[in-house]
Amino acid sequence: MNRLLRSLLLSLVLAGGVAIAAEPTEPVERDETTTAPEQNQEQKQEQEQERDFRIDISAHESDNVVVNMWGEARLGANDVADGVIAIFGNAHVEGEVIDAVVTIFGDAHVTGPVHGGVVSLFGNTYIDGPVQEAAVAVFGDLELGPNAQVDGDIAVVAGKLTRDPGAVVRGSSEIVAGGFPALDGVRLWIEKCLVYGRLLAFDAGLWWAWVIAFGFLLFYVVIALMFDRAVVRCVETLETQPGQSTVASLMTIVLVPVLFVLLAVSLVGIVVIPFAGMAVLCATLFGKAVILAALGRRVTRFTGIAPLSHVAFATFVGGLIVLALYVIPVIGLVASNLLGIVGLGVVGYTILLSMRQRAANRAPAAAAAAAASAAAAVPSPEGAPTSTTPAPAPVDTTAPRAGFWIRMGALLIDTILIGIIIAILDSPDQLWLIALAGYGAVMWKLKGTTIGGLVCGLKVVRRDGAEINWDTAIVRALGCFLSMVVVGLGFLWIVFDEDRQAWHDKIAGTLVVRTTRPESLV
């Protein structure tokens, strides 16, 4: 059983991408004329197996391992190798293997002598020669030919064992959970689709994959029927603002993991994680329907037929286009990933635009209320004022934009300040980024700037002229993580942008301006 565990461990290590190069084993010279009385039973059994397994290793010199990915690993009848490894491909072994034969997502056909074991993950194994250690098939079948001689154990997990009457097995045999006919379809999908970097292929054995694909397409069409207005609005966002939608998609890749990390480090956020995960999943599925509708509208807009202009029909047409892309090697897998990423980004950006629109609609109402308050402050005919509350000063978005270096100087001051506070409080160093983001969000909401901004004469304003609210401050703080994580490219964007906006400014809809009016913290 130790040999079985060793073979399984070797297969799992190789599946994780770590290759272990074993040194060639040298033959052990034994004095067959004397036998130690204290030799235990296991050593005696191994000695008998070695005497029965008469292959002269010293007659061969080998220091190589045959490794092949995405293809067949072949060892000829007169060749010797330390090991044979095939990943996403088959192994055909006729020569001598000093250590082991391992296949992952591929079949193994072994007729030559193997001094180690034979292990297959998600593949079938055929052995018709001597194997000194274990023979293992995980999620695959194992067949022993008439010339098979396995001195170790045999294990078949989620597969079936076929054994010729002439096969010799000296170890124990173990079959776990028998064979699964459905695994044949999975292995065929791996061989025909995954190996080529695609999701679908034209093969009779892959009918179930096409059924699943059309089932998801029907699901997206139903989404377009039920939420047609929301889908149309997201499609219009993608069509009218493709650049911003693309940037939002790239930001989503970074911001979503950051959001879950922030939730995980807070005790209250741990409870929110399942609901946040469900929200991201629903938004991703909805976003895929949006991308399919956007693709389909490129075709249906030319038909001129009213029923065919519905967004649900466009989603169906776009789905057919994507299914055709799924068949193309490499492009199919890339298209599948892009659908989810771009779709989630477009949905998130549309929600952000909706929040800005609602805030902009509230601004005239607030201005009208302020005007009414000012009118109420006019002295009455008796000369007694009814109110002295001043109207809020309008935000100046025409002030000069702050450049890269002055903003980096303000950021440096804030970073040093937060670092000193973290050191005084003896808090973990890993919290300083979170503390810096929280500090920025609070200061932007309350004062429109930070202490570093006060020193450098900077102020954060909204592009639409409205007052900064908590939504804008928090979104801007989270967006800073994206600007920083991509090698600081989000901050360097200030140098090239016409409005001197960083990526987090574009996400939150803010500007950083120079101000000559002195600010205070109180």
Image (tube, helix red, strand yellow):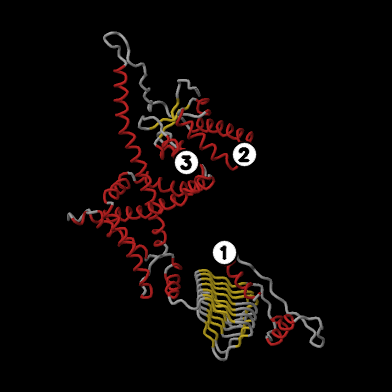
Q: Mark 2 sits on what residue?
A: 427
Position of 134 with respect to 305 (left or right) is right
- Dot 1 and dot 2 residues touching (CB under 8 Å): no
Q: Mark 3 sits on what residue?
A: 478
Q: Residue at point 49% right, 25% down?
A: 457
Q: Earlier in the sequence, mark 1 or mark 2?
A: 1
Q: Nearer the viewer, residue 444 or 243?
A: 444
Q: Residue at point 57% right, 82% down?
A: 94
Give the number of callouts: 3
- Dot 1 and dot 3 residues touching (CB under 8 Å): no
Question: Height in image: 93 above or below 419?
Answer: below
Quarter of the image where the N terminus is located: bottom right
Query: Foreground mark, 1 or 2?
Result: 2
Q: Position of residue 218 (x, y in %)?
A: 30, 62
User: Given the image, on which type of amino acid does mark 1 rest?
Assistant: Gly
Question: Height in image: 162 above or below 331?
Answer: below
Q: Quadrant of residue 299?
A: bottom left
